[in-house]
Image (cartoon, rainbow, N blue to C red):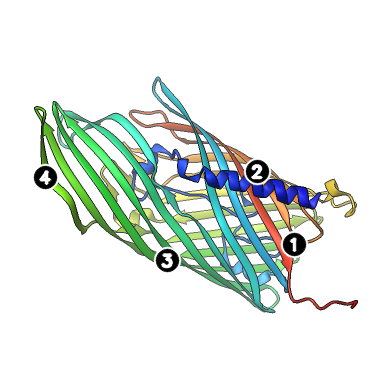
Amino acid sequence: MKNKIVLWSCFMLMSLTSFSQSISSSPYSLYGVGSLYDSDFGYLPSIGSSGIALPSDSFINNLNPASLGFMYQNHFLFDIGGKAIATTYQSGSRKESRNNFQFSHLAFAFPVSKKSAFSLSLRPYSSSTFKISNLKLPIMDGQEYYYLTAEGSGGLNSLDFSYGYRAGKKLTVGATATVLFGNTVDDRTFQIGSTLTTINKKTDYSGVRATLGAQYKIDSTFTIGTTFKVPSKINASKVQSVAAIADGVTSTIESNVASDTDDYYMPLEIGIGLNKRFKNNLSFTLDYEKSFWQDTKQSDLYGNFVNQDRFAAGFTYSSRKNARKYWDRVGYAAGVSYDTGYLEVDAHRVNNASFSVGLNLPIDNTFSSLNISYSYGQKGRIANDLIKENYHKISLNLALDGIWFVKRKIE
């Protein structure tokens, strides 16, 4: 059973990764550095991506570095994931469907001492892949309109170095240093009357961000957690070409000109969560996060950054009646999440709501498991020139547990 699950999991994850370059992302990735990417580890996608208060005792919890302080000795955890998304985009009477295959993350964690552990992960941070044709937009301070055609690709990647330490039996603290890097390519055509202006721009980004976290066990069944993401600046530079076309004549205004551009600012983000376990087989998780995007004082040509609120909750259950029976060890999960969004376009928030269900399929008698989840959600709305997204998402995370440095009892 174990070998079959591992074999099929690796095959499916390799298939998803091989399609990772064919991403058809949200039209809202036109803004900033693109749409922020949700790449959660283990069974977190099944519980609405909640888990600030969950310890990393049986899986890698990327939501709170303090969770590593509760990691068991001699265990080496490895996690790799991918997901498939089917999305329908709707605006007025127009509707379009796209399929999306993405690599999610690669991570591992191991204990450093009896009271601490370290993890390293690589995952996408944002995706800026989009294609928009003949979007009608008003000219600022005027009654006329212009038409925008845009196509983009790229995004930012996140390399996370995390460390958690247990200070006593109940309290853990942790920190994450995140290195953000990547680039976006943006081709845009602006049409006013019979005049076309084309802009080809490649922007490189790089920066570092810190996250602090803590978890406290009130008792053996109740844990609370908190995270604090420090505001930071992501440095940006661009290479740009600009041309104008009028009456069939093309005039080059710029050709591969390198210059500085507006840096991207990450906001202060504060999160708090709780986890309550009932009768050892039912667990409830609740998270709230606040992101102060408005304080970054950055704006986009087509929208504004606003403060963001996110709520998430989830349940997990396993019967555990007979540890020898496979299906008694299988975990079942469900969750919901609601995100007010950090973008405001034409005075409308680009919010996001979803629900999810999932299975935690154990592979052997360690913590190794295959986590499968299904999510359905809606993003944005149909209003003015806005686009509503309905998406179905399947996440597949393979978590492997290896036991290191244990002496043989029988030679």
**Of the residues under marks 2 and 4, which one precedes in the sequence?**
4
User: Closer to the observer: label 3 or label 4?
Assistant: 4
User: Closer to the observer: label 4 or label 1?
Assistant: 4
Asked if residue 376 shows in the view, the reply is: yes
**Of the residues under marks 4 and 1, which one precedes in the sequence?**
1
Amino acid type at circle 2 is Ser
Determine which of the numbered discs, if any, sits on residue 253 in the image. 4
The residue carrying mark 1 is 221
The residue carrying mark 3 is 209
Circle 1/circle 2 CB separation < 8 Å: no
Could you tell me which secondary element the residue under label 2 belongs to?
A: strand
353 over 324 or under it: above or below: above
- Residue 147 in the image, given as x and y percentages of width and height: 23, 30
Q: Is residue 99 left or right of residue 209?
A: right
Disc count in the image?
A: 4
* Distance from Cα at disc 3 to Cα at disc 2: 30 Å
Q: Quadrant of the C terminus?
A: bottom right
140 over 74 or under it: above or below: above
Nearest the eye: 227 or 241: 241
Q: Residue at the location (13% across, 33% down)?
A: 245
Q: Residue at the location (21% across, 50% down)?
A: 240
Q: Residue at the location (70% across, 59% down)?
A: 400
Asked if residue 46 shows in the view, the reply is: no
Circle 2/circle 4 CB separation < 8 Å: no
User: Closer to the observer: label 2 or label 4?
Assistant: 4
The residue carrying mark 2 is 373
Amino acid type at circle 1 is Thr
* Distance from Cα at disc 3 to Cα at disc 4: 37 Å
- The crowding category of the residue bearing disc 1, from other C-alpha atoms within 10 Å (few below 14, some 14 to 19, many at least 20), is few
